Image (spheres, rainbow, N blue to C red):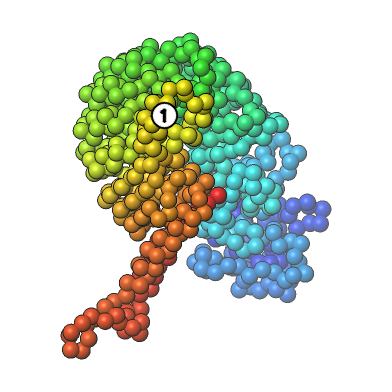
Amino acid sequence: MHHPQPHISSSASAYSAAAAFDFKPAKRRGSYNCGRCGLPKKGHVCQVNSGTSPTSTSTPTSSPAANTIENSSSASRLPQPPPLRQSSHLRRALSFDDIDIRCDSPERDLDGYDSPHPDTYLDPDDEIVSGGLLAGCLWEVLRRLPPASLLAAAGVCKGWRETTKRLWRAAAELKLMVPPRGQLRFMGLVLKKCPSLVRLSLKMESDVDATMLACIAFSCPHLESMEISTSSRAVNRITGDELGRFVADKRCLTSLKMEGCSNLGGFVLSSSSLSTLWLSDLYSLSKMVFNCPNLKEISLEFSCQENDTTDLTTMVDGMGRSCPKLQNIHIASLRLSHAVVLSLTAANLRGLRMLSLVLGLEITDASVAAIASSYSRLELLDLSGSSISDSGIGMICNVFPNTLSRLLLALCPNITSSGIQFATAQLPLLELMDCGMTICDPDSQNPPSEQSGDDSEVPNALNNKLHLMYQKLIIKHSRLKKLSLWGCSGLDALCLNCPELKDLNLNSCKNLHPERLLLQCPSLQNVHVSGCQELLVGAIKGQVSDSITSLENQFQLKRSADGSKRVRAPDCLSPQTSDGKKRRRVMERQCNVHVG
């Protein structure tokens, strides 16, 4: 007994070409009659055997043998299309086109159909969609499209619409650029399609307020990660109370990242599931309370305005008490001071592994000593924009020789090339180092002033200026992978012996002489030389190409017949497989010199 289903798969496509196209001309989208006996399908159990042919119409392309197609044969080969003269009805024989979906039907949705199990996922490899393409192939193609293109693809045909509908339903992560007009309607329509969404990333082209948060909270009940970024023309109008209510209501939220938080004013965040929190563009917060016992990573970036009135000392003290599991801390503010560092060290966060305190001009070597005494297992330390000196670098090297792998000391004018060399020599696990704008030319920072009346101070000032300007840097490290020396206009000579170095930044190194440059870095992939002299750029390209040529010329060497000396073997005697692998490795090691 055969029980017809409202949705026909390719494995059950046992109709002949004549039966597939047998419908009354008055019908808009096909026939609702049985293909075997001609009776209406609704509530009908067909009594005709599958081996019998249809009674009424037949075409020259149909045959009794074509009326029965086994499941094995349908899985192994695609069905043959009917003749071209019936091309207007080709889509009626496809599995996704057997259901009539109309926009004016109140019971049906544009994306769905009437089914007792709408979320049942059928195996895409057993279905065939438009043009004889397997649904599995179409799935892999459509899942790589952006949301806008995926919405457009749903209008091609019913087969594509069904596949896109399943993609929306199965989507766990969504990244959208929200248009400036009709953003709430757009978000409501898109989020309605994704009931399983757990990760959401939005790029706002217009202002965002609490209404958007309410739309997200209603449409995404299982949301775990949310990121909201704003364009230069958009303004984030969400207040601290509205953000606090959103975090408290979303019990599953584990990650929250938001830009443009200048209108928060103050907030209280209470969540037992939140583990990652990134807030940027903060300004003059009256209160900051974190009741997040499972918070592991926090990033707070304040706007660079001198009239900021945020009390960072109180904030850090409360954060240390209420968030004992913190591992990564990043704070960027002009109000960072030694008192803030002391409050952070008093919190005794035992799991702290990454500490970044940026733009704190009042952070000195005493602050480094406090950090070293409380947190001896740091893997990343970022004190960019501070006032530490070479003595502070010495304390860092004495405390973190076995753990520190990333050290960032950009915009630290009190650091010299001697401190940088000492750090690379005493930190064997170092993989990333940023020393941008540390070795600077005094003339580039201080404009020439009027000559002083005391001529005795001129030689001393000139000697100090020459000492800061003409500095040499020699680095030999076996594990260093990224080195940044951008803006080091006081650097005169550079010698690098780093076999694992892949990225080198020499932007705006204006006084670096080409004849005093030596790069022994066979793994180098990218060199940034924007704002450098043309001779320096040519010298870098020459040394990089020479290193690649030396690698390419390393062919197999063999001894001569009498064993007296080693000679280079010709290409015909070298194994083809090893030569091909060597050439592929050389091609992968080509270095890119970025001038612009």
Q: Where's the N terminus, which quadrant?
A: bottom right
Residue at 34%, 17% in the rendered image: 338
Residue 286: where, in percent of width, then height? 48, 10
Nearer-the-camera pick, 5 or 122:
122
Q: Can residue 409 be seen in this view?
A: no
The answer to which image quadrant residue 8 occupies is bottom right
Residue at 69%, 48% in the rendered image: 155
Residue at 29%, 76% in the rendered image: 556
Nearer-the-camera pick, 171 or 332:
332
Residue 572: where, in percent of width, then height? 35, 85
Residue 129: where, in percent of width, then height? 61, 58
Q: Is residue 117 above or below residue 546?
A: above
> Can you name the residue that lies furthest to the bottom here?
561
> Can you name the residue that lies furthest to the left here?
563
> Can you name the residue that lies furthest to the right here?
26
Q: Is residue 494 visible?
A: yes
- Dot 1 surroundings within 10 Å: few (below 14), some, or many (20 or more)? few
The answer to which image quadrant residue 570 occupies is bottom left
The secondary structure type at the circle numbered 1 is helix
Q: In this view, does 593 lie above or below 545?
A: above
Nearer-the-camera pick, 445 or 428:
445
| Residue carrying label 1 | 458
Residue 396: where, in percent of width, then height? 26, 32
Residue at 36%, 55% in the rendered image: 519
The answer to which image quadrant residue 289 occupies is top left
Residue 382 left/right relative to 156 = left
Mark 1 is on which residue type? Val
Q: Report how many numbered discs are placed on residues in the image.
A: 1
